[in-house]
Amino acid sequence: MNNIITKANPELFKKNWELYLTTNNHSLIYTLDYLEYYHSYCKNIIDDLSFIVLRDNHPVGICFLPIETFEKSKSISLNEGYVSAPLSVDKKTEKTIFEYIHTLSHKHNISQIKLYSDPNLEFNIPNKFNILKQYGYLETNSLNATIDLSQSKEKLWSNLSKSFKSLINKYIKNTKHSLFIMDKSNADIKIMKKFWQLHCDIAGEHAREFELFNAQFQFIKKGYASLYYIKDNETIISCSLFFHYKEFVTYASSVSKEIEEKPPLSHFILWKATVNFKENNYSLIQYGQPSSYSQFSGIDDTSSKKELHIASFKRNMGASTTTLFRGIKYFNKELLRDKLNDFLDIWQLDEK
């Protein structure tokens, strides 16, 4: 007999969600702390229908289900992007979860659901398959960039492009700056504020509220994130933030101030971080998206020129390209028609 627990009972929900995580494979994005982090920067969320499936009073499945407004309709998504797919102990529970998502979608007049499979949990699984196709989702796969840290340091170095090796070597040889790492052992809110201020300076305004950076700082204090940064005297001139949990690392963001010294600072920071995470027995770095090769790769998979440049940068840093399994289920034909028309408008066909 299956029972459903929702956030209507916060204490019971928290207890059983954490119990599921304690006894089953998962990554950082499924922790309650990270779900709250989503709420700190996804401002269009109007409801959270997350639920847990119990069998014999034991949690056997979890599902994060944020609802946000989207083009005057409601969508299961995050900033109009994708939500991590539910987790379950077996196919029977998986089917129960997707059926309940379908029921909730009709009850709450949802126009679309956008889900993706966490690539960390797909790592080293042979014969990968997009399970969303089994439940009526339109496949909208994209590309992801990762670095396998099981490789030797020499192999990781050889994977770098020739030009990036040259830039990193030039920086190591000529730099007068120092690299620092802020983690759980030395977490300092003053450093985090300088990271935030650097973001604001580069953007030309307070592009992001400090609330988001303070949420990231809480992950640092708990040992789930680290900030790598370079100082010029007492001025921070480059930063890169990484989340890490269990054996997985996620490259979250970076920002650098232009300096007279030509070698880019980010190349050096990322290389030093890669080596450090390997030496600390992490298995994988997720460079994530954007990772595409072309501007138009498929339905709901387009990239700007800036995003293509970032994707190229990741490959030059030695990242491999893998498939990111995604899917959309539409409940609104007009929304689907608009998406297909948009795709046809921008897709460039080769003329004969």
Image: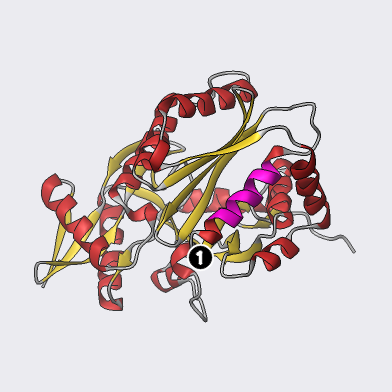
Q: Quadrant of residue 211?
A: top left
Q: Residue furthest bottom?
A: 127
Q: Position of residue 135 (x, y in %)?
A: 39, 70
Residue 331 vertical position relative to residue 136 in the rendered view, above or below: above
39 horizontally vs 53: left or right: right
The residue shown at (39%, 41%) is 185
On whether residue 270 falls in the magenta region, the answer is yes
Neighbourhood count class around disc 1 (C-alpha, 10 Å): few under 14, some 14–19, many 20 upward: some
Q: What SS does tag 1 mark?
A: loop
- Report whether residue 300 is seen: no
Query: Which residue bears the numbered disc 1?
Result: 283
Q: Quadrant of residue 20?
A: bottom left
Residue 2 vertical position relative to residue 162 in the rendered view, above or below: below
Which residue is nearer to you in this view: 34 or 227? 227
- Report whether residue 325 is seen: yes
Residue 84 vertical position relative to residue 125 in the rendered view, above or below: above
123 horizontally vs 312: left or right: left
Which residue is nearer to you in this view: 350 or 196? 196
The residue shown at (74%, 58%) is 160
Q: Position of residue 6 (x, y in %)?
A: 18, 52
The residue shown at (23%, 55%) is 51
The residue shown at (49%, 48%) is 335
Screen quadrant of the C terminus: bottom right
Q: Position of residue 24 (x, y in %)?
A: 28, 68
On whether residue 290 falls in the magenta region, the answer is no
Which residue is nearer to you in this view: 289 or 201? 201
Q: Main secondary structure of the magenta part?
A: helix
Q: How many marks?
A: 1
Q: Position of residue 177 (x, y in %)?
A: 68, 32
Amino acid type shown at disc 1: Ser
Residue 87 vertical position relative to residue 193 in the rendered view, above or below: below
> Which span of residues is magenta-colored?
266-276
